Image: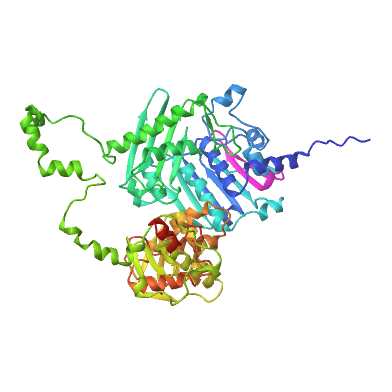
Amino acid sequence: MADIIQLLPDNIANQIAAGEVIQRPASAVKELLENAVDAGADEIKLIIIDAGKALIQVIDNGKGMSETDARMSFERHATTKIRNIDDLFRIKTMGFRGEALASIAAVAQVELKTKRPEDETGIYLEIENSMVKLQEPIAANQGTSIAMKNLFFNVPARRNFLKSNAAELRHIIDEFTRVAMAFPEIFFSLNSNGQEVFHLDKGTLKHRIVQILGNSYNAKLVSVQQDTDYLNIYGFVGKPETAKKTRGDQYLFVNSRFIKSAYLNHAVMNAFADMIAKDSYPMYALFIDLDPAQLDINVHPTKQEIKFEDEKIVYAFVQSAVKHALAQFSITPTLDFELDGSIQNMEAVSKPLTDERRSTTASSSLFQTFSQKNQAHFIEKRSELKHWKEFYESPAENLSTTNVDRPASEPEALPLHKGYITEENIIQLHHAYIMVQNDNGFLLIQQQNAHERILYEKYITTLGGKPMATQQSLFPSTLELTVTDAVMLMELMPDLKVLGYQLEPFGKNTFVIHGNPADITQGNEKIIIEKMLEQYKHFSSDIKFSNREKLIRSMAWQQAVKAGVALTKKEMQVLVNDLFACATPNCTPNGKPTYMTFKKEELDKMFGR
């Protein structure tokens, strides 16, 4: 019987290996930019066409390569950085495993131009399917230009899995900003389809952060700096008021390499405890420098996950450095434990307490108020309590927060029908809840959750049929966004148009708002769109939703009437009637209850009736 185990041909083995390193155009961008940084360049230009599917080109002014090195760079596991196994644990550069260029050459058509300063001519290479098709001398500037065309041209199944151009461009911008953030001393530019998206001049780290994340952070950054024998931490965190609903503006670097670490992210979040809302995320760009021997960066194909020799020490230092920075800039409340000397000389402190003074103090009304106020059996006889009967007779007499029945999910079991609600049996509590009395007890409706459900179903109906009416703005407003948000808004514009928004691009990362849905209050257009994008990014981490679903949920959440808003009787009636006209009235799109039922017999039981 014939042997059945065979070695894979090199080009197929390379394609399989490429799948680990080059998962999408952004993966190639990351590898090529890191190689340019390693080459000692101080000017790096990235050019992309069709979100990297047609072309990704990186041009640098680094040290270039010799003819032999140019050929060798495309061999698997060819590297300048490792000679023995110990070198793997002393890595300070970006690329080191010699997989990037070999992987790119396996799944794209590659053109390389490179020249060293000491050489008279440069080298030009054309590579396809891991094979060199052409090699010749060429006139070239110092440095390297590498262009990869038609990504996954020879792996059509992989190409079909790529997302829309707008989605892939967002991933490319993410990778570009991570490398650019880490090296503010290098000039970076990004050109997409002939348009310059980023032009990042050399400067300080603070300057680079503001260039990338927007001018809104300019006066709202707090410097973090802590040097120890074990590690150094430096960078910036945003003041608490800049915290957002999404994690977007969070950057953590170890030895200038961007990493993802839920553990260290938790350390930063702990430092911000009690200063920001629980569902908010602070901005930070933090750099940790430590001996490479203390960490292992070779644990993941993209090198974004690393292992520390002692995570707990790093965690403690990160949390301490951020806390110290926030306290130093008077952002966290601090207590002064030094006692004012004048207090010691006050009569109440310096003189002993006699029996006479103790009895005088104990008989005072102030002392008795303090000692009795919080005793359950004590009722102070005050004139303000005379209105208890009026309160007892008001509709609020039925209110209880125990024995709650979850709303039935079946439409037949709805506790109300249209037209049942009148001004007499409806009341708003705490500007957040609507209480409606019925024959069996009462309903308690959370106004924001209820309105979110109403808007969600309204938008679904709109996107499936007739577009919403647009109200033209008398004075169109201009909306300026970060690059990432601008790309996202371009992607959402067709659906936003159906939902009543009239937007058009107006130069670099700027849009003009000509009109908005007819039922939106004029003057809030910019804030509404900015908050909607923020919420959209919040949903973007959940891959089970389509872009359209994310947009609808974001708009419903953003435009729903919030807790704390007083409603008229008429507004409450409309809200309740609209809720029970919904196909699924009992919960919000993400599953929070919109109302709860309180039954009369349960109330009777509670009071022994």
Determine whether, in the image, residue 68 is placed left or right of residue 307.
right
Image mark count:
0
Residue 557 location (% of width, % of height): 44, 61
Position of the C terminus, as image quadrant, is bottom left
Depth check: give the residue in front, 223 or 65.
Answer: 223
On the question of residue 256 being in view, the answer is no
Query: Is 123 colored magenta in this rendering?
Result: yes
Query: Overall secondary structure of the magenta stretch?
Result: strand
The correct choice, above or below, for 392 with respect to 216 in the image is below
With 112 as the anchor, is 353 left or right in this view? left
Query: Where does residue 233 sit, x and y in percent of width and height?
Result: 40, 32
Q: Residue at x 17, y 53 (%)?
A: 381
Q: Residue furthest right?
A: 1
The quarter of the displayed image where residue 59 is located: top right
Res. 85 visible in picture? yes
| Place of residue 243 in the rendered image (x, y in percent of width and height, measured from the top left) | 37, 48
Specify start and end residues of the magenta stretch as a single range: 106-133
Percent from the top left, x then y, of residue 330?
A: 26, 39
Residue depicted at 25% across the width and 47% down the height: 377
| Nearest the eye: 76 or 590 | 590
Look at the image and name its color scheme.
rainbow
Up the image or down, 164 lies above or below 320; here it is below
Q: Residue at x 53, y 63 (%)?
A: 408
Depth check: 70 or 455 in front? 455
The residue most toward the front is 609
